[in-house]
Each structure stands twice: as C-alpha cells, then as structure tokens.
Amino acid sequence: MFFQPDNAWVGDVIPFERDGEFWLFYLREVRDDPEAGSAWDVVTTRDFVTFTDRGTAIPAGEPDAPDFNAYTGSVVTGPDGTDHLFYTGHNPRIVGPDGETPLQIVMHATSRDGLTSWVKHPELSFGATEGYEAGDWRDPFVFKAAEGQPWRMLLAARHAAGPRRRRGVIAQMQSDDLMTWRPVEAFWDPRRYVTHECPDVFPWGDWWYLVYSEFSESFTTRYRMARTVDGPWITPEHDTIDGRAFYASKSVGHGDRRFFCGWIASKEGSCDDGPYQWAGTMSVLESTQRPDGSLAFDIPSELRASFDIPHASALVDTATGTRYTTDAEVTLSAPDGYACVVSEAPIPATAYASVTVDIAANTTECGIVFRSSADGDNCYILRLEPRRSRAVVDRWPRRVTGEMQWEISGDVPFQVELERPCTLEPGEHTIDIVMDGSLMVAVIDQQVAVSARIYDRTAGGFGLFAGEGTATFRDLRIATRIR
C-alpha cells in the first residue's frame, strides 16, 4: 500500500491495467540532486500489497532537452496494439513567450513490446494552443468515449486572460490516429480555480466521472459526476477523495472494481509540524458506488487480508483501572466528561486495526487513539464528531519544540486539512486504520478516507474513547503481518 523507491519519492501516479496486472507509472522525485531531471519509473502489482519495481520507463531528458522533467500524462493502447504514452515536457531553462515562465509541452512515446521499452517521438510534441498560457499545458489524459469517436486529450491548462486565480480550465484536443491533434472546445471550464491538475475521466455504470486535483489553498483531489461524457457535471455532497495529505490521485479499473492511486505527501524535517512537500509515498484507495452514483472510498480488501497475525493486549480504563480483553465489548459513558481505555502493550509500527462503535444519541465525540501513552493523553487521535458531521485526525500535545520535546503551551489548533465530512447518525459505525511507520490511512464506514503523516510519535498503545456521551465498542481487531 505504501510503495516508495530507495533514495527517492513518489510523485504523480499514472495507473494502467493489463490482464489483471496494474502498471503504476510514477514521477520519480530525487530531492537531493537539483541537476537530476524527473523520470517516469514503474512498479507492477496484482493486489496493491506486493510490488515489483521495474525501474525507469521514460528517462529524464538531457539538461537542454524539453523533457528534462518528464511529468504527468497517461497511457493508452492503439488499435494496432501499439502502446502510446503521453507526458508533459518541462525544462526550467526553456521559457515561453513571456520570457520568464518555463514552457510546458505535450510529448509522446510508443512501445511495441508490452509497456517496457519506450521510444520517444519529440517531433510529435506540441505546446499550448491559442488562448491558453504557454506555461500551463500539462498532464495529458487520453481516452476514447466510445468506439467510432475520436480520441480525446484532456489537459490541465489556464486561460491567457481573466482573473489570475480563476483561469483554470481543462482544455481538450482530439485525434483520429493518436499522432496528430486538433484543438476543440474546452472539456470543463468552471472559472473557479488556479488550475485542475491530473484530469481523469471514466464511465462506471450509468455515470461518467471527472477527477482532478485542485491546485489551490485546498490542494486536494476532487470528482464530479455526469450522465454523459460532455456533462453537465454535478458536484456531489462530499466531492473529495481524501484530505490534504493524499494528492494527485488518478484511477484505474479492473472488472467491476476501481482503484485510486495517489501519494501521501512527506513533510519537511520529517516531523508533524513540517510543511507539506511535493511527492511522498504511494497509496491506493478502492472506490465503490453508492446508490445515487456518488463514490465511497476504502482500504483495498487485499490489504486488510494481508494483516493476518493477531496482536492481543488487554485494554485498561485510564481512570478506573478496569481491564478488558481485546475481544470484549467496551461501553464508555461520560455524559459530561471523558472516558478512555488504552492497551497495556504497544502496537507494532506496522499494524491494522478495526472496530465497530455504536454511538448513542447526542454524543459529542468518540473514536480511537493510537501510539498513545498509558494514560491516553499523549497520542494521535481519530475523532468522530457526530454533531459536526465530521471526522478529524488530531494529536496531543499539538506542538513539539526544536529538541522534539512535547510542549503543551500555545494555542495550536488541529490541522484543518485533516478534517473530513462524515455522516455520523446515532447507531453503529466502523473504523479501519492502517499504520506503517510515518504513514496512516483511516476509513470510516468503508466510505470516508483520511490519510496523514505520523512522524513524531513512533510507538505507543491503541485505545478507545468517548466524550460527552456514550459509545459502545465491539469486534476490536488488531493485527500485524510479516513483510
């Protein structure tokens, strides 16, 4: 679930499926060598649990080449069986008409031997067409809506005129042969954002879906729905795939299943307070359709099944000392206070936990703590807040000093980017969480996902809590696996 190459980071993932095998092309980010351009590397998997690293697919160009940085694109198979790879060429040394902004161009490579040996075709490259900024012309996504129709190419672009913050548009090109392209009317033009990165379109049942990563203060991946490929595009009630930490997600289908592949951003200084960085570690969510066509997101079932070594530990009430076995039903009732139980033994750094919680009416908060101190106070928290219809990833204390010592003083709120809208009516709900080193993914009701980095606390127990109300926890399972 959390693939990362040695001595590098995973940027945008470009997934492609063939014969039940997923080819996960990705941008290889090498931060400690500014003279190294960006290449496409690739790993393959059949279950999103074990990966085969196949090395570089598209190498970075020479220092003076237009694809010194080979950035995001897509892969399709032509009618003659040739595989076509479209990608973004970028070189900070090559600037556009304004004399300042580096050009971005669409570039093309082909393979005739099964996605492994790619031949670049620089003569087929092209830049922004009239009316678009030359420095924002990237992430080509190629697809065909139906047989007999032309190929379409969607691009993250910006209008050349208009309010600078709202020029973002998904431009569109069309082709009959995948070789020459002509401009057509924009695919989606909401005039709302800076730009819409990594566009992705697919049909599923009676719906079409448009996925894009919003380049704005939100910095998150969203989706829209429509009955036809040309819209109109509907905004679902909850339109995000995950929170701030999971970005640039693109999807891939196999049979009746669909997976969203993105990256969990690393943070400067490898600490919880560090700013997010571009690129990180690969992560995959599986999507399902709700009856109204909106999408739910979950941990892939294969990943759950891979955690097959039970981890048992008694749970201890932090106030009364009452002990519960892992498989016991635990009711925490605190009408105007707080109650918590924490495991006696620490959980492994790589672990999976699941629990069902029955939330009583008018309960303010409940959830889980992890990597917790024995008293349940120093910990990471997944907090369900029914009255606010949200789930929050939090920590306490919320600040560390330069010597990495916990500090309680200071008005430090939780990271709002890790808040997720979540329907939490009274009754039963499920929580699933995977932790692996500095990474975690939690899912509520197999529908709402939130990913995060958890650097500062590397060990501790697992616990359950309720505040200003009552919550009954049952079917707790904690497991690890041999990697």
Image (spheres, grey):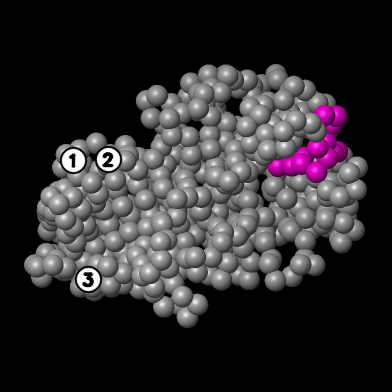
Spot occupied by residue 191 in the image (x, y as percentages of width and height): 66, 29
> Residue 85: which quarter of the image?
top right
Asked whether the residues under the numbered discs 3 and 1 touch, taking CB atoms below 8 Å apart as contact, a structural biologist would say no
Dot 1 corresponds to which residue? Answer: 362
Which residue is nearer to you in this view: 338 or 55? 338
Main SS class of the magenta portion in the image: strand
* Disc 3 to disc 1, C-alpha distance: 26 Å
Q: In the image, is 482 to the left or to the right of 39?
A: left
Residue name at image x 20 percent, y 54 percent: 466
For label 1, the SS is loop
Q: Earlier in the sequence, mark 1 or mark 2?
A: 1
Which residue is nearer to you in this view: 254 or 26? 26
> Residue 378: which quarter of the image?
bottom left
For label 3, the SS is loop
Q: Amino acid at mark 3?
A: Asp
Q: Earlier in the sequence, mark 2 or mark 3?
A: 3
For label 2, the SS is helix
Q: Earlier in the sequence, mark 3 or mark 1?
A: 1
Of circles 2 and 3, the one toward us is 2
What range of the chain is rendered magenta?
Answer: 126-144
Asked whether the residues under the numbered discs 1 and 2 touch, taking CB atoms below 8 Å apart as contact, a structural biologist would say yes
Residue 16 on the magenta span: no
Q: Is residue 222 above or below residue 463?
A: above
- Regarding residue 352, the answer to whether it shows in the image is no
Q: Residues within 10 Å of mark 2 (few under 14, many from 20)?
A: some
Spot occupied by residue 236 in the image (x, y as percentages of width and height): 46, 28
Dot 3 corresponds to which residue? Answer: 375
Q: Amino acid at mark 1?
A: Asn
Q: Amino acid at mark 2?
A: Arg
- Regarding residue 192, the answer to whether it shows in the image is yes
Dot 2 corresponds to which residue? Answer: 387
Which residue is nearer to you in this view: 323 or 409? 409
